[in-house]
Image (cartoon, rainbow, N blue to C red):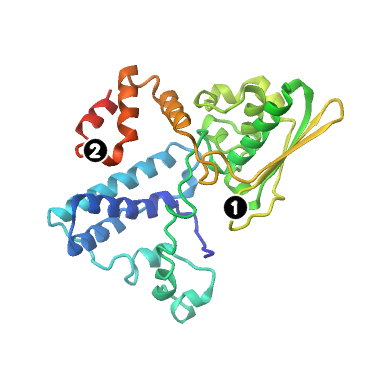
Amino acid sequence: MPLVRRGWHLDGVAGTIGATAAAAKLLGLEQTQLEHAFGIATGEAAGVQANFDTPSRSFQCGRAAMNGIMAAMLAQRGFTGARDAIEAPDGLLDCYYTPLSPHLVRGGEGGVDEESLFAQLGNPYDVIYPGIALKVYPCELAAHTSIDAILQLVEQYRMNPHQVSSVQVSVTPAVAVLLPYPNPQTGRQAKASLNYLIAVALLHGQPLIDYFTDAAVRDPRIQEVMARVTVAATETSTTLIPRPSSVALTLRDGRVLRHRVEFARGHPELPLTTEELDAKFLYCTRYILPPDHIEGAIDQFRDLEKIQDITALASILGG
């Protein structure tokens, strides 16, 4: 359903409600307590897109999880909120849900048409279809099909950056909006810069955490390769293939190498192997946890649904 987002951050707003539902289920709240928990949570649901290239983006996600847990625990202890705070006039939906289609609004003027909206909830559940996408690279997910495309070209043709005279990348208009920094100035901006990500992939291979620092962005080699990258929003998005990307490398000998990727690695269509998941966790925690804690955490994650008490796992993750 098309929506006008008006600058609010989906993870910060909807994430707070989702975290509340999850925490309430784990705590075993009964119906009235759950309604109060949602009432408490709606007042904490917040976040703006303007923070996307700052640490506040991550903070908004973490705060959503914290607020959800807090709302559920407060409700469990008798604290109350409006039991209809999601759907009531001036509630969460009135504040954040702005449909483009007039028939989804009561009387075409104001208030949400609950019948039209709620008919779509859980139909289907996104965690079932299309499923959960896991990020292989520590950057904006919208760039991953393009990164995969260039990495596959480099691997297939065994080329080096000096052989490439120019790179043309094609993405959908929606993806282009999510990657607004053709010439990033900071490591944060680099995470949402397709030009930078393509240059890193061409020079170094898979983009890793170390490439998202201010110093890495200023690397003259990356800057020189970035100057050869052109991005165009000419791909077409479909329901089945929302973020395709095509990459064309023009070599100095005149050859043009092309590759198109429809689904990024880690997408439900191309799930990661157990070994790939273990490798990513190892890489991300190598400077944080002792080796034996890393191995212990991986072992417990593999049987997470069977764990009755997470105290041991929490201790391992605490270092």
Q: Callout 1: few (<14), some (14-19), or many (20+) C-alpha neighbours within 10 Å?
A: some
Q: Specify the quadrant that holds the C terminus.
A: top left
Residue 260 badge? none
Mark 2: few, some, or many residues within 10 Å (few <14, many ≥20)?
few
Q: In the image, residue 48 lies at what x, y percent?
A: 44, 50
Toward the right, the furthest residue is 254
**Amino acid at dot 1:** Pro
Near-viewer residue (111 or 151): 151
- Residue 231, percent from left and from top: 70, 41
In the image, 210: left or right of 61?
right
> Taking 70 as reference, is 91 above or below it?
below
Q: Is residue 182 left or right of residue 22?
A: right
Where residue 125 sits, quadrant-wise, is: bottom left
Q: Residue at x 26, y 40 (%)?
A: 306
In the rendered image, the vertical position of residue 254 relative to residue 98, given as above or below: above
Foreground pick, 33 / 96: 33
Residue 8 in percent (x, y) is at 45, 54
Q: Residue 224 in the image: x percent, y percent?
A: 71, 24
Distance of label 1 from label 2 (alpha carbons): 36 Å
Q: Which residue is mark 1?
A: 242
Q: Residue at x 50, y 33 (%)?
A: 138
- The single residue placed furthest to the left in the displayed view is 78
Q: In the figure, 278 relative to 52: above or below?
A: above
Camera-nearest label, 1 or 2? 2
Q: Quadrant of residue 232?
A: top right
Residue type (three-letter) at the residue carrying disc 2: Ile
Q: Residue at x 47, y 43 (%)?
A: 51
Q: Which structural element holds mark 1?
A: loop
For residue 307, the mark is 2
